[in-house]
């Protein structure tokens, strides 16, 4: 594969009237890469995706897919990508089978044995009318059509929001298959654990701005470890150490405390603790959810970004 | 049991009224304004006897009887009698339309939007939405009743009496209630708002058509249609109140039916279960075929509806021709051959008035379809197309083109029906060329409407419904221009005003050419605008 990224978004801006939905979004997806695009409700995930798809016109910045302009060359671009919207609404009087074929045909794709295999795997009854499908089943229709397309770039907007764990699993396997075949995948979600299982790279968006991009390992590095410790000495002095957060001393004894430590500060802090003679120590592994929560809940801790990048 | 079924109806009603107040107020203003406004003006519009005489003669022609209802014979033509004869049927049609739209959006519409599910999980009764919808329709019609009744008694037209005033106010309101309840019932029976609207509109149209065909041939049998009940009341000259009882009674029965249906069905479903279908479709391959398939039922309904209306009008051509025959003066002075020619001449003149009915139907059909470009975006279908290698222009052109062709087909079906009726009833039918002219000129009007609609969709989609109102106003202007004695300049505000005498006179290609050119430019502007704007999703 060439070095050229499949998707390149640079400083994208988008306003709806006076409301700024996206203020600065930069994003890149390479062949064989799965990018998880996460952020809270209303952060601008769907807006970004629709701009990438040339449905919305950017007010600033550039969006190129396959090296072509997302707005100007939408038709060319769309020949080589598949998309599943966040809310899947389908023509009520078509059956699921008809809808899958229609979606495939419009992309210039064929109904292949893979399509049938996917219908089987997702356990969809293609003879039912769309109007009688549940939310998850409607999503399956769109997913089957997208997954059985042979294209270079796949975009999923919250693909598993309506799927049960079993079907979610199948979806994850399919994404792994596409990734192995060297396809590029952009996947939006608000559930980190889902992206964690599939994604190589994570981009976090909040209030129309990308606030963090990095590989999973990089991100883990930025997380904090939760520590609960009982010592013989007085723990109060620990609170002042750099890299210690959320320090809580037990109400009854100053020798018991819980706190969180930045990954970089782990070793000096633990040395300080060891000096106080440890009688009990519990360390919870760094969870991405914690990191994520910190980004989401920025009002509670306004300095987070600065903290992490230090 | 009562609580289980109806809890919180009052609160729902309040919510409905707050949400719908603008819609309700506009309808109310429109309906009451037309009734009271015309009543106030009727004494002054036709001051001299000659004008009145000619108006009454016009009103008794089959074209007007077909449209406005049967006009009483052997009754002193006071302003009041004229008012009720002109207004009752047509206004009741409007009341019925308003009521059924209100009723359906308050029940099935809410359900489709997921609101019913949300609220029924709270302590809202099972049938509370249905009952709240009923109250909304009832209150709406009561409001019109009081305002119109009050207005009429204050104005006190010549020849009016109190009983007649209130009967004239009550009948359309009761008629509105009846069709509001029809809407409620069908909203329970079928599973989609679109189908509920379509089927209740079809019933309203059917009732109207039945009355129309009876009125022009044998008015005494008109109790076959609820519209006929209005005429049977003989407001101001007989003042029968029993048709009112009939209207209220049938509303009650249908409302009970709505309750039964609501009880028998599941949330989100209709009475009729949706069956499975074929896994494959050979038709479906892109936006156009998807549009054709989703539109299939409407397609046939509109086509057949237009054909039937054309046939109905066509089948009264002989009554027109008979008027010449039955006039002993004419019979004496001109020969058989000329008489038939004269008869046909009357028919051709009549066709010019009729065109407006057929073209308005076609225009409405075309506007509905053009607006689907927006509606389907809201429904989420456009997003599926837009992610495919399908350009904006192609997508827009698909919808607009389909709308245009359907407008023409609907117009064609109407003209075709008219021609067939004409062939069936007239011994020497009017020549086909007149029908071709009628179709040709009016198809240009359809084009103009679609082009303007496309421009609105591209630049100001919020205002897309304005054109429907414009089409409605255009209809009133053209159909009643003789009654209102409108000048030639006034009717030119609508496209068909420019060729109002077709098919009596041959096509004026310069006017049509300008219209076609203008439409092409508008379509190009629309394409340019649609190409560069954001897709609208909700
Ligand atoms: N057409 C529009 N007009 C005005 N505001 C809009 C429009 N579309 C989106 N927005 C606003 O832009 C912001 C971003 O919306 P977007 O749908 O991209 O969020 P999201 O990240 O996909 O959220 P979710 O997780 O809930 O799907 C929201 O505040 C939304 O209200
Ligand atoms: Mg979204």
Image: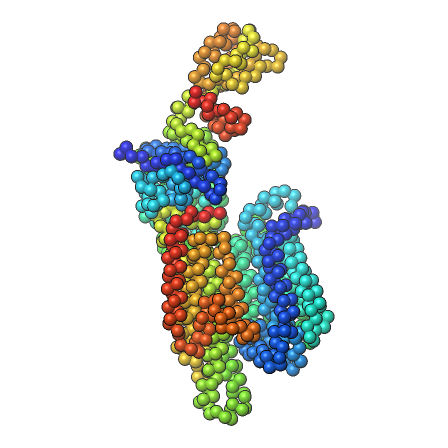
Q: Residue B368 appears at what percent x and percent y?
A: 47, 59
What residue lies at 60% left-to-right and 76% top-to-bottom?
A: B70
* Relative vertical location of residue B347 with respect to residue B516 in this rendering, above or below: below
Is the N terminus of chain A in the top left, top right, bottom left or bottom right quadrant?
top left
Quadrant hosting residue B210: bottom right
Residue B432 position within the rendered picture, expressed as x and y whole percent measured from the top left: 40, 77
Task: Please give left or right for residue A143 compared with residue B54 in the image.
Answer: left
The quadrant of the picture occupied by the C terminus of chain A is top left
> Can you give x and y, in whole percent of width and height, for residue A260 in the image?
50, 18
Can residue A137 be seen in the rendering of this structure? no
Question: Which residue extends farthest left?
Answer: A2
> Residue B499's x, y, as percent?
44, 72
Q: Residue at x 50, y 16 (%)?
A: A244
User: Residue sitting at 48 percent across and 63 percent down?
Assistant: B364
Residue B485, relative to residue B326: is it above or below? Answer: above
Relative to A165, residue B165 above or below: below
Instruction: Specify whether residue A61 is in view.
Output: yes
């Amino acid at each position: 594969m060439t070095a050229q990224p499949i998707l390149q978004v640079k400083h994208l801006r988008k306003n709806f009237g006076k409301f700024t939905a996206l203020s600065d979004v930069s994003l890149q997806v390479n062949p064989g890469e799965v990018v998880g695009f996460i952020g809270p409700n209303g952060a601008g995930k769907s807006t970004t995706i629709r701009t990438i798809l040339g449905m919305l016109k950017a007010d600033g910045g550039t969006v190129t897919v396959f090296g072509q302009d997302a707005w100007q060359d939408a038709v060319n671009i769309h020949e080589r990508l598949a998309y599943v919207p966040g809310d899947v609404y389908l023509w009520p009087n078509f059956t699921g089978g008809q809808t899958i074929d229609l979606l495939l045909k419009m992309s210039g794709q064929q109904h292949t044995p893979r399509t049938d295999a996917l219908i089987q795997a997702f356990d969809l009854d293609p003879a039912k009318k769309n109007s009688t499908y549940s939310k998850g089943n409607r999503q399956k229709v769109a997913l089957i059509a997208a997954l059985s397309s042979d294209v270079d770039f796949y975009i999923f907007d919250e693909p598993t929001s309506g799927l049960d764990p079993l079907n979610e699993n199948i979806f994850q396997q399919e994404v792994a298959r596409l990734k192995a075949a060297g396809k590029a995948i952009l996947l939006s979600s608000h559930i980190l654990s889902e992206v964690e299982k599939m994604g190589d790279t994570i981009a976090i968006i909040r209030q129309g701005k990308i606030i963090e991009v990095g590989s999973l390992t990089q991100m883990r590095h930025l997380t904090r470890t939760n520590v609960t410790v009982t010592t013989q000495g007085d723990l109060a002095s620990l609170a002042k150490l750099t890299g210690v957060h959320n320090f809580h001393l037990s109400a009854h004894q100053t020798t018991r405390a819980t706190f969180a430590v930045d990954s970089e500060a782990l070793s000096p802090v633990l040395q300080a603790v060891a000096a106080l003679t440890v009688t009990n120590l519990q360390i919870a592994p760094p969870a991405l959810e914690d990191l994520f929560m910190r980004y989401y809940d920025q009002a509670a801790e306004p300095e987070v970004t600065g903290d992490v990048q230090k | 049991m009562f609580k289980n079924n109806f809890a919180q109806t009052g609160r729902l009603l309040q919510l409905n009224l707050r949400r719908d107040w603008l819609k309700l107020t506009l309808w109310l203003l429109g309906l009451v304004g037309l009734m009271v406004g015309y009543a106030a003006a009727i004494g002054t519009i036709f001051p001299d006897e000659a004008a009145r005489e000619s108006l009454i003669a016009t009103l008794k022609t089959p074209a007007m009887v077909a449209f406005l209802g049967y006009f009483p014979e052997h009754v002193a033509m006071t302003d009041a009698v004229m008012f009720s004869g002109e207004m009752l049927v047509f206004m009741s049609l409007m009341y019925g339309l308003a009521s059924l739209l209100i009723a359906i959006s308050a029940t099935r519409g809410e359900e489709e939007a997921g609101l019913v599910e949300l609220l029924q999980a709270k302590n809202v009764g099972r049938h509370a939405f249905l009952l709240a919808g009923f109250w909304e329709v009832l209150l709406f019609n009561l409001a019109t009743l009081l305002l119109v009744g009050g207005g009429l008694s204050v104005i006190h037209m010549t020849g009016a009496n109190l009983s007649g005033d209130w009967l004239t106010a009550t009948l359309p309101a009761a008629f509105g209630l009846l069709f509001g309840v029809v809407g409620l019932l069908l909203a329970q029976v079928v599973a989609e708002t679109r189908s509920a609207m379509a089927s209740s509109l079809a019933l309203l149209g059917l009732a109207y058509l039945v009355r129309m065909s009876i009125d022009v041939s044998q008015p005494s049998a008109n109790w076959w249609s609820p519209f006929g009940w209005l005429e049977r009341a003989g407001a101001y000259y007989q003042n029968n109140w029993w048709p009112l009882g009939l209207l209220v009674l049938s509303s009650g029965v249908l409302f009970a039916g709505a309750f039964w249906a609501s009880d028998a069905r599941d949330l989100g479903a209709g009475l009729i279960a949706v069956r499975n279908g074929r896994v494959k479709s050979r038709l479906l391959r892109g936006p156009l075929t998807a549009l054709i398939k989703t539109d299939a039922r409407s397609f046939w309904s509109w086509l057949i509806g237009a054909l039937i209306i054309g046939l109905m009008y066509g089948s009264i051509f002989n009554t027109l021709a008979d008027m010449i025959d039955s006039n002993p003066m004419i019979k004496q002075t001109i020969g058989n051959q000329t008489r038939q020619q004269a008869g046909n001449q009357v028919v051709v003149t009549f066709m010019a008035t009729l065109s407006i009915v057929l073209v308005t139907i076609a225009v409405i059909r075309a506007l509905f379809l053009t607006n689907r470009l927006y509606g389907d975006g809201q429904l989420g279908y456009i997003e599926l197309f837009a992610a495919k290698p399908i350009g904006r222009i192609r997508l827009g052109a698909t919808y607009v083109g389909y709308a245009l062709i359907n407008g023409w087909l609907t117009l064609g079906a109407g003209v075709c029906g008219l021609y067939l009726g004409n062939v069936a009833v007239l011994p020497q039918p009017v020549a086909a060329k007149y029908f071709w002219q009628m179709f040709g000129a009016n198809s240009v009007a359809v084009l103009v409407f679609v082009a303007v609609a496309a421009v609105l969709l591209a630049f100001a989609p919020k205002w897309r419904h304005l054109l429907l109102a414009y089409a409605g106003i255009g209809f009133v202007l053209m159909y009643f221009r003789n009654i209102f004695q409108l000048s030639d300049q006034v009717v030119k505000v609508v496209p068909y005003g420019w060729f109002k005498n077709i098919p009596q006179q041959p096509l004026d290609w310069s006017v049509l050419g300008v219209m076609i050119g203008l439409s092409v430019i508008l379509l190009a502007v629309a394409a340019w605008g649609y190409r560069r704007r954001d897709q609208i999703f909700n």
